[in-house]
Image (cartoon, rainbow, N blue to C red):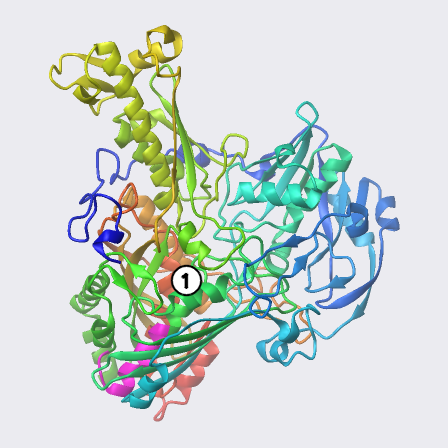
């Protein structure tokens, strides 16, 4: 990117603003959401109770791969309390099909039926829906269903999938849904021939569940007056749910309304559309009675969207001074039985392929990305989307290179990290200014000044503890605009966001956004943006989200896009309302429009005579109640709208994580003694909220590094059906996290902010893994797989020469 590529009025050396901090932005004010949520007045999907409401549940497959030879619901329908039961033939719905605009040799689409009919592809796949007067009758009805199968061989690992002896989808030879080589720049082979050191690392991450506190759920009902289906569901993408429900039911979108109440987490699992929402909506269309479905935890662990199972085979060339000269990567992602809608099975390998060089100056780059299908629950995006995995791969490369070259691993990073901005990488991505080197330096200095390096050296000499220090330096592309998403060749291209702001006669405002809050405090942070732009008290701003009738269109919340894109649209709408207020005030004050301005205190002031002022209430009184006094070319009411789309490649937050761990010689357990995060997410709207996002993400990253994993036996049966089997860390296992903020305002978002939602998750697995390997350095063992099992650590320590 050159200066001419930047937004109008911006140069590379002179950003449009140093900061957007104001009276409200930058302050950790009390959250608007807290009084409601902390006093039990929150309203989640399962809190909804409608007159005559029925309950639904699903008959699910008990085998991973089979032809369905029969579904008999006769006994189900005879169960007391059961109102109806439907299989795929009864409902006759359209399939869910997610598409990429890529040739057949690169991408194979798969049709995911709402209810499986002839073929089962994973344990837990829905076969029929049972509707009853209460949840107990639903369970009895499910138990009475009779399903017969002709069992097939299950595809449960990469080797079996690629061998192709058993196919999950007949139309996908070798069980490959996507096979794309996005980059093969000149000089890769020559760099390896000339390399002083060539590194090869194979990293693997286990399959995880996003594990939102609130499982998926939906309440659908029929509005006879409006001839409309109302779908109340916990989703990150209400407009996408509306679109898919309408398509599968073959009805106009105007006949479907989707609303979202309070939501207890999503983490990406709810930014795709599930089959269950569509099935419940179809039942209501037939019965014209409200129906509720709430996913239980067993369903969530076995049949809900999963994530993360990926393997990276990474080769890297280095010169003698530790500079990377080439990167050659093979990315394989197990995406489960189907492509998710709308992102497809390509979301993970395409993300990794595009951004694998991370924060480093890589001169030559080759990558192949593949998405495999298997007899496992489908994969959806999960906080970070491949970035925890490719960052772990590149960070392991840096560690291995340091060892081979006899250099300090932090110094190897320092020699390779991007320091001049804007920087266009070998991956054709332009990185806006950040603090990559500065965050690394500060994280290292913090650990060193606290004495951890000295303590590790002392423990080595005396042999009484096994301490390790690990680092991870990374960036997070946030606020992907339509240009960035279009490069993936998606047929559904997210990007822009819309906002409308409306002031009432009291001077208070309601603002809408197409983003979707599921724990990020949008009601507070968006209000802060509006309050500063209009110069009003933050308590006079109300945010409305999650209603397809009130918001023309929105892409929801994922990929840290809310404050960058949604917040920018809100800021622009606020400014346009301010311009309208000034225009009306100038007319009423009988002065020129350029002679008035918002005064920052709920009014408009005449610049050449500050004693002349109109409050917002006075202006609103005219706009609504005495509109004959308005300028002739101004319409009544105080309303403004705006859209925003991030230009080019988007903006990049960055961070460095530093971790100190201790390996227990008796159990192999890993205990985190110190966790330091230095983060730059641009202008921080609400510091406490941002820190909470960071700590929550780090907790999930630690979970993936040390605890959580869904495994499968040879027949495709998942190991984790409850929290007895799926190991979730508690507050005891998650350490206190020290967070330091650097601030490089983004030059092309309206608030100077970059996203902060996923960074904690991205850096934690690599930092923890590197620290564990540092603790094991005297054993000769290096681990490249997460989660790290205690037995693996224990075996390494026990086999150390001389014992412990």
Residue drawn at x 24%, y 19% as measured from the top left: 603
Front one among 230 and 99? 99
Q: Quadrant of residue 765?
A: bottom left
Residue drawn at x 54%, y 50% as measured from the top left: 270
Residue drawn at x 58%, y 39% as measured from the top left: 45
Magenta stretch, residue numbers: 394-408
Q: Is residue 345 left or right of residue 392?
A: right
Q: Residue placed farthest to the bottom in the image?
A: 801
Front one among 728 and 392? 392
Residue 395 lies within the magenta run: yes
Residue 698 visible in the current orientation: no
Image x and y of residue 490, in percent: 51, 56
The image shows residue 505, relative to residue 247, as above or below, that is above
The image shows residue 175, relative to residue 41, as above or below, that is below
The image shows residue 756, relative to residue 68, as above or below, that is above
Image x and y of residue 575, in percent: 30, 30
Name the residue carrying label 1. 701
Residue drawn at x 25%, y 26% as measured from the top left: 535
Q: Which quadrant: the C terminus?
A: bottom left
Q: Main secondary structure of the magenta part?
A: helix
For label 1, the SS is helix
Q: Which quadrant: the N terminus?
A: bottom left
How many labels were placed on the picture?
1
């Amino acid at each position: 990117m050159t200066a001419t590529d930047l937004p109008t009025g911006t140069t590379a050396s002179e950003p449009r603003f140093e900061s957007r901090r104001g009276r409200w932005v930058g302050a950790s004010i009390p959250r608007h959401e807290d009084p409601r949520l902390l006093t039990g007045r929150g309203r989640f999907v399962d809190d909804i109770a409608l007159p005559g409401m029925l309950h639904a549940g699903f008959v699910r497959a008990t085998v991973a791969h089979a032809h369905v030879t029969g579904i008999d619901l006769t006994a189900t329908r005879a169960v007391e309390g059961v109102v109806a039961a439907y299989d795929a033939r009864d409902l006759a719905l359209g399939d869910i099909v997610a598409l990429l605009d890529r040739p057949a040799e690169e991408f194979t689409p798969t049709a995911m039926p709402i209810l499986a009919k002839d073929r089962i592809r994973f344990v837990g796949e829905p076969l029929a829906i049972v509707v009853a007067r209460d949840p107990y009758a639903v369970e009895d009805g499910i138990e009475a269903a009779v399903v017969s199968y002709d069992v097939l061989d299950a595809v449960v690992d990469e080797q079996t999938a690629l061998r192709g002896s058993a196919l999950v989808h007949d139309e996908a030879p070798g069980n490959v849904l996507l096979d794309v080589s996005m980059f093969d720049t000149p000089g890769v082979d020559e760099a390896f021939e000339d390399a002083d050191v060539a590194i090869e690392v194979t990293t693997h991450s286990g399959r995880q569940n996003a594990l939102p506190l609130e499982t998926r759920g939906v309440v659908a009902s029929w509005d006879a007056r409006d001839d409309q289906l109302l779908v109340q569901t916990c989703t990150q993408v209400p407009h996408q749910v509306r679109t898919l429900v309408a398509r599968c039911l073959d009805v106009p979108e105007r006949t479907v309304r989707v609303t979202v109440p309070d939501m207890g987490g999503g983490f990406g699992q709810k930014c795709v559309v599930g089959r269950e929402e569509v099935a419940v909506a179809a039942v209501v269309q037939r019965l014209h009675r409200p129906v509720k479905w709430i996913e239980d935890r067993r369903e969530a662990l076995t049949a809900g969207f999963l994530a993360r199972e990926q393997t990276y085979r990474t080769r890297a060339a280095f010169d003698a001074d530790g500079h990377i000269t080439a990167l050659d990567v093979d990315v394989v992602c197990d995406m489960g039985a189907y492509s998710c809608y709308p992102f497809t099975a390509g979301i993970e390998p395409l993300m990794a392929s595009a951004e694998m060089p991370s924060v480093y100056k890589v001169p030559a780059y080759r990558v192949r990305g593949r998405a495999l299908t298997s007899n496992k629950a489908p994969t959806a995006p999960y906080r970070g989307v491949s970035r925890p995995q490719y960052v772990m791969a590149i960070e392991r490369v840096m560690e291995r290179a340091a060892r081979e070259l006899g250099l300090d691993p932090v110094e190897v990073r320092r020699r390779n990290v991007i320091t001049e901005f804007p920087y266009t990488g070998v991956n054709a991505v332009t990185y806006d200014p950040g603090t990559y080197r500065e965050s690394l330096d500060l994280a290292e200095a913090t650990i060193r000044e606290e004495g951890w390096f000295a303590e590790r050296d002392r423990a080595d000499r005396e042999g009484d503890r096994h301490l390790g220090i690990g680092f991870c330096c990374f960036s997070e592309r946030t606020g992907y605009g339509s240009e960035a998403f279009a490069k993936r060749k998606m047929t559904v291209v997210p990007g822009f966001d819309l906002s409308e702001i409306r002031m009432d006669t009291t001077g208070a405002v309601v603002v809408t956004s197409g983003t979707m809050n599921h724990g990020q405090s949008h009601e507070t942070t968006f209000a802060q943006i509006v309050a500063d732009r209009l110069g009003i008290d933050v308590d006079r701003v109300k945010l409305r989200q999650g209603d397809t009738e009130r918001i023309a269109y929105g892409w929801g919340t994922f990929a840290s896009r809310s404050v960058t894109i949604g917040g920018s649209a809100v800021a622009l709408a606020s400014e346009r309302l301010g311009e309208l207020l000034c225009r009306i005030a100038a007319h009423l004050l009988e002065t020129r429009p350029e002679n008035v301005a918002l005064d920052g205190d709920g009014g408009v002031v005449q610049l050449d005579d500050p004693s002349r002022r109109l409050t917002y209430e006075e202006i609103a009184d005219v706009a609504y109640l005495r509109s004959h006094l308005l300028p002739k070319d101004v319409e009544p009411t105080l309303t403004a709208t705006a859209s925003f789309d991030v230009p080019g490649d988007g903006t990049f937050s960055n961070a460095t994580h530093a971790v100190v761990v201790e390996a227990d010689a008796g159990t192999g357990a890993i205990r985190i003694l110190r966790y330091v995060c230095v983060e730059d997410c641009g202008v921080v709207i609400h510091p406490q909220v941002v820190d909470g996002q960071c700590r929550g993400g780090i907790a999930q990253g630690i979970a993936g590094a040390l605890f959580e994993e869904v495994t499968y036996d040879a027949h495709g049966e998942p190991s984790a059906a409850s929290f007895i089997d799926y190991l979730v860390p508690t507050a005891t296992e998650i350490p206190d996290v020290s967070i330091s903020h650097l601030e490089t305002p983004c030059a092309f978002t309206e608030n100077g902010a970059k996203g902060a939602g996923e960074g904690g998750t991205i850096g934690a697995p690599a930092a923890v893994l590197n620290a564990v390997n540092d603790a094991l350095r005297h054993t000769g063992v290096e681990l490249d797989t997460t989660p790290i099992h205690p037995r693996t650590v224990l075996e390494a320590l026990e086999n150390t020469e001389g014992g412990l």
